[in-house]
Image (cartoon, helix red, strand yellow):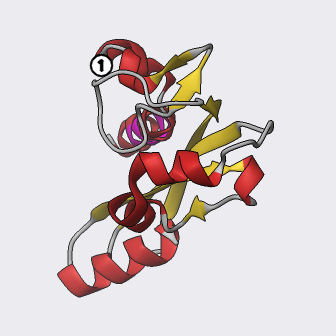
Amino acid sequence: MAAFGAEWAADKLGSEVMVDDSGLLIGALGGFPGPYSAYVFDTLGNDRILKLMDGDTDRSAVFRCAIGYCVPGEKARVFTGEVNGEISIEGRGNAGFGYDPIFAVGGRTFGEMGEEEKNKLSHRYGALLKFAQWLKTNNETQS
């Protein structure tokens, strides 16, 4: 989806673009909400996600991010990142946004972490770091 979205947007806008396609995949729910993460969060929220998982012992979850970058008329490049964690039994912490209070790494939810700590673990950070490294290398070879 990131490649398609980046190519479509670059062609429509006539300029280079970067798009983000991120999602939460919960093991016990068969990868749900996956590509529908934003819609599901807006519709159900964290409390109902936790209710769906009530009694599940498999709490595994993965946050995935795909950054698509495209110049008009070219194929998109995609840079990915992911972080493995688990869904907590209850929401904890007030930091961050979205699923942060229920997504835990090392026993702490993203909602309990400071911004700097969370960003070092973040799926989006991993994808953006790969993009930045590619951009630096690409610019050096064209200089």
Bin the neighbour count of mark 1 within 10 Å (Cα to Cα): few under 14, some 14-19, many 20 and up: few
107 left or right, relative to 2: right
Residue 131 highlighted magenta (yes or no): yes
Q: Is residue 14 above or below residue 69?
A: below
Residue at the far bottom in the pictured view: 12
Q: Position of residue 65 (x, y in %)?
A: 51, 49
16 left or right, relative to 24: left
Amino acid type, label 1: Glu
Q: Report if residue 119 is visible in the image.
A: no
Q: Is residue 124 above or below residue 8?
A: above
Q: Residue at x 72, y 37 (%)?
A: 60
Which of the 4 quarters of the picture holds residue 116?
top left
Q: Residue at x 74, y 42 (%)?
A: 55
Which residue is the site of mark 1? 115
Callout 1 secondary element: helix
Magenta range? 130-135
Nearer-the-camera pick, 71 or 118:
118
Nearer-the-camera pick, 8 or 49:
49
Q: Report if residue 61 is visible in the image.
A: yes
Which of the 4 quarters of the picture holds residue 54?
top right
Nearer-the-camera pick, 101 or 62:
101
43 left or right, relative to 17: right
Q: Position of residue 93 (x, y in %)?
A: 35, 21
Which of the 4 quarters of the picture holds residue 58?
top right
Q: Position of residue 83 (x, y in %)?
A: 60, 33
Q: Residue at x 52, y 72 (%)?
A: 1
Residue 46 highlighted magenta (yes or no): no
Q: Is residue 51 above or below residue 140?
A: below
Question: Predominant secondary structure in magenta?
Answer: helix
Q: Quadrant of the C terminus?
A: top left
Q: How many marks?
A: 1
Q: Position of residue 21 (x, y in %)?
A: 45, 60
